[in-house]
Every structure is written in structure tokens, then in C-alpha cells.
């Protein structure tokens, strides 16, 4: 049975980690997180692995039960060696987030180089081949997630510019040129998300608004502490008043595999799967060392957001 750790409403799968370096057929230095979705009963993953030379690549994985994940031997997305993107992907690509939209699947991923971080866009219809479309952000922007429907006639995405530590929203008519940016969610003094925050999962439309998981960072004397929380944004204008927000994290690093690794005390997610029975499978990276699974329910998450809203 799933095990619930005190104070977390996300239940860790008892067999965690789902994937560590002993479960794959190729050599790697680290495992980060995974974008994911469910298509016709099959679970699909785009998982970030760090190669032995420190460069990150994105690999395709799939599963029938959401637990036993088969990962391809070769990356489905790697840094370009030639062309315009090569200069900006030299140190790797990572953190893919997948959004289904009008019969296609759009992927926002992060590219890194000596010039910093940028967001890039790719698309696919079948996950057999993925086409890169180009850079879609200003420099030093992370944590991009595309909304699964247009808002007031425009594409919308969440992002985290490196300055300020807040989550922003930007809009586009063509998915390539973005603007009209506004702050959506900011760190809160004194809370678990005091120093900087960023979007984790692709927004989910619910009756109350847009639901997101997000990560929050607190600086401590022992280093950074990265946890996961949730928020509900206004459906018509996500930058308007927040509908609800968790005052406590829904998942905190407590287990040894979440506290010990290349980046200690870190749980970080790029994807959740919402099942037909309202169960949520949250896939998260732990200490940049392994991929893990937590489960909760949509009702628990919504109740936590709405109960906390009056307090902040």
C-alpha cells in the first residue's frame, strides 16, 4: 500500500524510487525529473538524464501500469550539434513538460549553455519523432509550461524568469513570439516558498480554475530546501486574484533518497497524471538522483488550496 509520511498529503509509492541508475541499460551520472501524460491507457514519459560528461538529454519511456517504466536506450531529444540551436544547447536540454493541444503534443523544455538558460518549443504527433521549433523565451527563463487551451484567444504559458523568483504568465498568437507578461504567483515571506518558486506541472482546468503544482525554495543554514505545493489560478485571467494556494507543502524531502544526492533536500516535478477516478500520479525527481512516484487525489489537493487561501 502507498505510505503517507506525516504532514504530506502526497503518498509515496512504497517501491520508490521508480527509476534509479541501476534500472537502465545505459550509463548516466544522474536522473532528474519527467514530463508525462497518459494516452489510450499508456503512460508516456520524457525523462531527463545527465550523461557522464555532464550534458543532459531527454529520453522516452513508457509504462502500462505507471510503475514499471521501460526507457529507450537512446535519447529522443539531444542538444543540436549544428544550426542555430547548437550554441544555446551545448550544455544540455532538460525538464520537458508535455501539453496536448488540438491533436498534437507540445513540449516546452529548457536549454542550457554558457549564455544561461532559455525555453525552447518542440512538437510531436506520435512520440516517434519530435520536431524542435526554436527558442521561445528571453535569456535566463526556466520552468515553462503551456496551458492546454487558449485563454481569451491566445496561447498562454507559465514561466520563471531568473530575476525575482516569481511565476509569470506570457501570451502568444503563434507559439513562437511571446509577450504581454504578468506576474501570477510570488514567494511569500515566512512561508515554505519564501525565496523563489517555479511551475512544476502543466496547468489542469478544474471547476474552480487552473490547478498547478509548483516548487518552492527556502534557503537554510544547510543549503536550499526545495518542496512542492499547489495553487489554483483564475480561469479567465490567471494573473488575477489567486483562488487558492497551499500554505504547507504537499510533498517535502523526508526520505533518504530525497535528502541525499547531487542536490540535497530536493523534490522537483515536471509532470502529473490525472486519472479518471480523480487519483493523481505525481512523478518527481529526488535530489537529482532518481525518479519517484507520489499519489494523492484531486479532492485533497483542491481542499488544501481552498482551506489555506484565507490564511495568506
Image (spheres, rainbow, N blue to C red):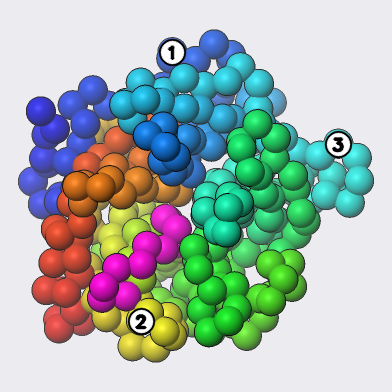
From the viewer's perspective, is residue 46 above or below residue 156? Answer: above
- Asked if disc 2 and disc 1 are in contact, CB closer than 8 Å, the reply is no
Q: Nearer the viewer, residue 151 or 26?
A: 151
Whether residue 275 is in magenta: the answer is: no
Q: Quadrant of the N terminus?
A: top left
Furthest-right residue in this view: 83
Is 260 positioned to the left or the right of 198 in the image?
left
Q: Nearer the viewer, residue 77 or 91?
A: 77
For the point 20% across and 36% down, which residue is it?
A: 12
Query: Residue 86's spot in the image, x, y percent?
Result: 84, 44
Q: How many marks?
A: 3
Mark 1 lies on residue: 22
Q: Bounds of the magenta span?
A: 199-209
Query: Residue 277's spot in the image, x, y percent?
Result: 19, 47
Point out the tag, 2 or 3, that comes first from the N-terminus: 3
For the point 31% across and 26% down, which residue is it?
A: 65
Point out the tag, 2 or 1, that comes first from the N-terminus: 1
For the point 31% across and 49% down, which residue is it?
A: 274
Mark 3 lies on residue: 81
Query: Residue 142's spot in the image, x, y percent?
Result: 58, 60
**Could you say which quadrant of the image residue 119 lies in?**
bottom right
Amino acid at each position: 500500500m502507498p505510505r503517507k509520511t506525516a504532514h504530506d498529503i502526497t503518498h509515496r509509492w512504497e517501491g520508490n524510487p521508480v527509476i534509479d541508475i541501476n534500472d537502465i541499460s545505459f550509463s548516466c551520472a544522474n536522473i532528474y525529473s519527467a514530463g508525462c501524460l497518459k494516452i489510450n491507457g499508456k503512460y508516456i514519459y520524457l525523462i531527463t538524464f545527465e550523461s557522464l560528461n555532464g550534458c543532459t538529454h531527454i529520453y522516452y519511456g513508457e509504462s502500462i501500469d505507471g510503475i514499471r517504466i521501460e526507457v529507450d536506450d537512446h535519447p529522443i531529444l539531444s542538444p543540436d550539434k549544428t544550426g542555430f540551436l547548437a550554441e544555446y544547447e551545448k550544455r544540455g536540454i532538460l525538464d520537458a513538460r508535455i501539453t496536448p493541444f488540438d491533436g498534437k503534443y507540445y513540449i516546452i523544455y529548457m536549454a542550457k549553455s554558457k549564455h544561461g538558460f532559455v525555453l525552447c518549443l518542440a512538437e510531436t504527433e506520435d512520440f516517434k519523432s519530435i520536431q524542435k521549433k526554436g527558442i521561445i523565451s528571453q535569456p535566463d527563463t526556466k520552468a515553462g509550461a503551456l496551458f492546454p487551451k487558449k485563454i481569451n484567444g491566445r496561447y498562454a504559458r507559465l514561466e520563471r524568469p531568473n530575476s525575482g523568483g516569481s511565476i509569470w504568465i506570457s501570451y502568444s498568437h503563434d507559439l513562437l513570439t511571446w509577450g504581454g507578461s504578468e506576474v501570477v504567483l510570488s514567494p511569500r515571506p515566512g512561508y515554505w516558498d519564501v525565496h523563489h518558486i517555479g511551475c512544476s506541472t502543466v496547468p489542469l482546468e478544474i471547476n474552480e480554475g487552473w490547478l498547478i503544482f509548483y516548487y518552492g525554495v527556502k534557503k537554510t543554514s544547510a543549503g536550499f530546501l526545495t518542496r512542492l505545493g499547489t495553487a489554483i489560478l483564475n480561469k479567465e485571467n490567471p494573473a488575477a486574484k489567486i483562488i487558492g494556494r497551499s500554505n504547507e507543502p504537499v510533498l517535502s524531502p523526508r526520505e533518504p533518497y530525497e535528502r541525499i544526492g547531487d542536490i540535497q533536500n530536493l523534490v522537483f516535478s515536471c509532470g502529473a497524471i490525472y486519472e479518471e477516478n480523480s487519483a493523481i500520479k505525481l512523478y518527481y525527481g529526488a535530489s537529482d538522483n532518481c525518479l519517484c512516484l507520489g499519489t494523492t487525489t484531486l479532492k485533497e489537493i483542491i481542499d488544501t488550496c481552498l482551506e489555506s487561501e484565507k490564511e495568506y
